[in-house]
Image (spheres, rainbow, N blue to C red):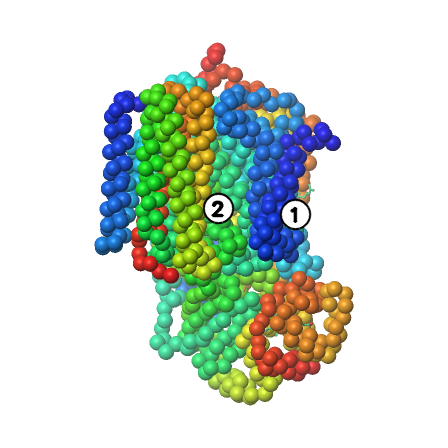
Amino acid sequence: MIHFVTVGILVMVVAILTYFGATSVGLMPVQASAQAVPIDWMWNWQVIAISFLFALIVVPIFYSIFVFRRKKGDTSDAEHIEGNTPLEIAWTVIPLIIVVTFAYMGAYSLGESRRITDPEAMIVKVTARQFSWTYEYPDGFVSTELHLPVWKQVILKMEAVDVIHSFWVPEFRVKQDVVPGRVTEYRITPNLVGSYKVRCAELCGSNHAFMEGPVVVSTQADYDQWVAEQIEIASANTPEGRGKKLITENGCVGCHSVTAQPGPSAPSWFNLFGEEVHLADGSTITADEAYITESVLDPAAKEVEGYAPTIMKPFTFTQEQIADIIAYIKSLK
Amino acid sequence: MKKIFSIPLIRGILWQVIGLLIGMGIVAGIRLAMGLPATGPYLVTEHAWVFGGFLGTLTFLAGHGVMGDWFKWWRGEATSDHHEDKPGWEKYFGPSLDHKVIGIQYAVTGLIVMILGGTFALIFRTELALEGMQFLKPAQYNTLMSMHGIVMIVVILLGIGGMMNYLVPLLIGAHDMAFPRLNSFAFWIVVPAAVWLLSSMALGGIETGWTGYPPLSANMKIVGQQMFFLAVFIVGWSSVLGGLNLIVTVVRMRAKGMTAFRMPIFVWASIATSLISLTATQLIGLSFQMVMFQRLFGMGFFDPAKGGNPVLFQHLFWFYSHPAVYVFILPGLGIVSELLPVFVRKPLFGYRWIAMSSLGIALVGFLVWAHHMFTSGMNEYLRVPFMYSTLLVAVPTGVKFFSWTATIWKGKIDNPVPTPMLFTVGAILVFLLGGLTGPPNATVSTDLHLHDTYWIVGHFHDTMFGGFMFPFFAALYYWFPKATGRRMNETLGKIHFWLMTPSFFVMSLGMMYIGLNGMRRRIADYDPALNFQPMHLVITIAGYLIALSVLVFFINLIASLRNGKVEKGNLWNSRSPEWLVESPMPAHNYEHPFEVVGEPYDYGLAGSKYVEFAKHK
Amino acid sequence: MSHTKDKASALQQGILVAVYLAVLTGLEFFVAVSFMSVMVLTVIALVKAALVAYYFMHIYKLNAENEGDHDSYEYKTGTNRLGLWLFLLSDTFVFGGLLVSRFNLLGMERPHLNQTLGLIVTCVLLLSSFFMNRAETSIAHGDTKGFLNGTLITMVLGLGFLIGVVGLEWRLAKLEDVIVNKDVMGGIFYMMTGMHAFHVLTGVIFLFLVWRNGRKGYFTQEQHWGVEAAAVYWHFVDLVWIFFYPALYLIGKVGL
Ligand code: HEA
Ligand code: HEA
Ligand code: CUA
Ligand SMILES: [Cu+2]
């Protein structure tokens, strides 16, 4: 009897220590969406259950190993206990009740995180492709950044053009795959102003690791201002402007960088035009109009040193579009 | 030279290469005749590689000789029931029909492949230790990561194949498996498959992870992807045939008096495992076959542009691959249940409940597959029923844990604790942590955050180490004397354990921690803003320590094989029949058949007996 | 094996089952053209499958008591039989997976196929099962000649089925535009018929080996496990077609 009491007390102590130990190290990123609240609530119950069940099994085992282990000189077998049916039934039924409760709580918190609270929710169309995210806003412009006003319900209608990707902002908690051939929905109400990142959570090819994009949650006023800027940029009808739009819509910047810092998997376009490019076959070539045109339409024809075999797929553009893109690349100095 | 080619393994591989070349030649010829280009970026086109691979597998089997008796049967010739193996090591490289030899072939192959899989992990872990890309390209990272995953899974399949083949006939008192030739076939078919699997690294790699989801796997213009599918498809056949053989063996070949509830508990676990591998495996085969055909013939099963459905693949794939995780663990948990009573000197608490819980896990395991797809865009309302069914698995698993705890309670464990027992307790602890991290994934709302993060990576390393690696090592330490007549070194065994267990906890807890905070899986590099570098460094170091401990194990294994302490008797003082005869086990197992006269685990009951040997044949 | 029925009644039973199957197939066709009910078609297919499994494949033999000497031919045959059935169970999952894929991808549409040809090949396969049954019951009654003839006819009918499906239907389907590359409809059609045809082909090879060994006098009234195995396998292939035929030819509307 004394053994049972000691073990019982130890189980409680270890369970509580485990729970507080685990939660104190910071198990989750900040909560930045209304949907994160029911999910974190559920998660907290999971941690409680894990801590308790872990202690419930580990403590008696260790207790037994230390207290009942073979004494010196004893060569006999242990007590002959074959089993105990009421006990077996108890530890079948009680976990059964626990898991059914948990499943119920899980369904409830799922329902909470899927609810559309605002019938006039903002709808943004998301396109995922290897390896970039682009967003089409209700006001008609396209961007590679996701800007959201705080406390406004948003529905992302997501589509993939090539393979499966997955839209995940850890601070929002929720994750949703983006599947070619169908539109999936991501419902979110950001509730904390800040800068986050969307991180593609489904292996989608060589560059999957770098398929991240900025997500900015701002006040309504800041958001409106950003929208106004974007509309202005989009309406400026210069070749560079059109070129920028094209490379945004086609996801080129998912791989190519437009700053001096090259991306991990494709050459930077910064200062590219007119420069010498070292090719994989050892030769060099000047990056002129013809070369860039060929690089876009048939990337495998001339591969840049260090990037062969290329992961870039051929694109089809009209001559005017290519001219716009080149104009844009030229502007990167 | 001639001597070398008389070794069936070498001859088989030679034939395999010849078969590959012939197959390639045929396809190239056909394509030329049809006016299509015959060469491709990988020498010849993908069609040629796949057909060559298929043909090469057949020629391996023909050249190796494992189908020799079947060819005779087809010609109407009778064959002898038993083939005597020649003494010496050569038998391990040829088509032996002895289940003990086959069991060792499985286990040793598994261990060798484990070195490969672990080395892949160490390489990409080194890359991950620091931010930024140091020495791997992203594509190489993906290949190593995918190879690590699939190779380790093959290790598990080989390991459980080894344990089940070696032990089950001994435990039930059979002289061999029901179909010895099929048994040999099921093992040897893995060898050409392993060759194809590794060859994919040279043919562009695999970039899809072990799950091979299309459209990515269908779009990747690399032949390695196909060789991966082909290899897994072939390994699947090994599983199917092995499972079939095992079920028949247990149903038909038990010793006299061995009723269902007097079977050693490991036999129950093997039955549950085999039911899964017999049936569900076909679905991974089918799904991979469909991607292969999509790539080869443009059949757009998973291509939305042609009316296909990428999510269908995931359903077919997980219909196998979830039950498969129970294939990974059930034999291991069987080992735990088998060893505990011996070392605590008490009966197995609730034998029947444990036996039934294995079946329960296996059967419920068929109904839960979509929990890997909560975020996949499948029908939303189906997620909740799958959450219920998944959580239900916790109940039979819990029965095992509670019964083990009760078995250990008041048990008289030797002091110092023998190595197999250390690994058994380690298995329970590690698997407990792995199991308990399952329900959060099974709960849809939390899985939306956890899916495809290092939390999941932590979860499954815990379950697989706890459910397979630890029990496998326990089994190796425990039955090594039975197979060799020598015992493994205890000190080295303890070093192995005490190095591996803490490192493992550090590694998996570290994975879970960063996973929760936003570390995705399958990424070659991580965002510096997340500040994960210190933890990644720790994980990598822990990974190296695990490897070191495994190295200690290998040294122990090899050294003990030659110089281990000679042990011919029942050194663990077990009631099990295989320990009641002299080690190493004679070629035809029990010279005198035994009859079961009592319960298997009645430790502590004076005068009780499990089996009684017949006086004469 | 322990067939207690005498020769004549075995023949009678074989004919009766074949007639039932034929009638049910006709009914199936009628249902499909008149009031297309998936439910009714499923029930009919299940009844057909049950008939084949019980009367042709003798599923009940699995249950036979064969205690006694573990080294006897009878005991070993029991072991082999269990192994074969488990193999078929495993195979069922492949075909089941294909059916699931078909309904997932095509839903209530079906490929444009030649109905007459479909009915003919179905009847050919059904007839082959009847002759296979003849072959097996013949050897079980010691009639080697009947057994050899039955096997031979089965084999020929099996080849006929292959020619019908692979030789004609594949070509027609291509002409009718169910081309592989076109869309997933063609993919499923070729995959399902191809996988089934592959099984028919292995069955024919198996039968050929049995026939050849039978001519050498390898099988006797008491010991003919090889024949039984070939027969059960052959009927299984028929049983699969019992489900594939409605899934490909009858259920749903023609779609392209
Ligand atoms: C050996 C292998 C193994 C085992 C045994 C398990 C066991 C379980 N797994 Fe795991 N799992 C994997 C291997 C395994 N898993 C792998 C490899 C993946 C990733 C695949 C990939 O994508 O690559 C994965 C992924 C995975 C997912 C998908 C996650 C995602 O990608 O989003 C889920 C979701 O439900 C899940 C759940 C579970 C559950 C509920 C169990 C349960 O069976 C656990 C049951 C055990 C316990 C619960 C502990 C003991 C019980 C008690 C002490 C009783 C009381 C308990 C309660 C009342 C809760 N696993
Ligand atoms: C049994 C299964 C098993 C085992 C044992 C391991 C062992 C290890 N695994 Fe894992 N792992 C998987 C199965 C397994 N793994 C699976 C299925 C995946 C998913 C893949 C996917 O996503 O597709 C995965 C993924 C995976 C990842 C995630 C990768 C990613 O998502 O990007 C990581 C990252 O750290 C990792 C690390 C490790 C490490 C460090 C070990 C260490 O324990 C390894 C220790 C090393 C050894 C055991 C070998 C010993 C070697 C020697 C002793 C060398 C001696 C040399 C000679 C004698 C010549 N593994
Ligand atoms: Cu997109 Cu990963
Ligand atoms: Cu699972």
Q: Position of residue A196 (x, y in %)?
A: 54, 71
Q: Residues within 10 Å of mark 1 (few under 14, many from 20)?
A: some
Spot occupied by residue A179 in the image (x, y as percentages of width and height): 46, 64
Graded by Cα atoms within 10 Å as few (under 14), some (14 to 19) or many (20 or more), the crowding at tag 2 reads: many
Query: Residue beneath label 2, please?
Result: B285
Judge left or right: residue B8 versus residue B613: right
Which residue appears at 51% of the width and 26% of the height?
A: B75
Return the mark for residue A139.
Answer: none
Disc count in the image? 2
User: Considering only vertical position in the picture, is A269 above or below B478?
Assistant: below
Amino acid under label 1?
Thr
Coordinates of residue B410 in the picture (x, y in percent)? 47, 33
SS state under label 2? helix
Looking at the picture, tell me which residue is in the foreground, B418 or B149. B149
| Residue at x 38% of width, y 66% of height | A114
For the point 25% across and 54% down, the residue is C33
Marks 2,1: beta carbons within 8 A: no
Q: At 64% across and 83% down in the image, what residue appears?
A: A327
Q: Quadrant of the N terminus of chain A?
A: top left
Q: Tell me how far mark 2 sits from mark 1, CA to CA.
A: 27 Å
Q: Tell me if residue B160 can be seen.
A: yes
- Using residue A203 as the reference point, say whether residue A36 is left or right of it: left
Q: To which chain does the residue with label 2 belong?
A: B
* Residue at image mark 1: B119
Along the viewing direction, whichever of C72 and B74 lies nearer the viewer:
B74
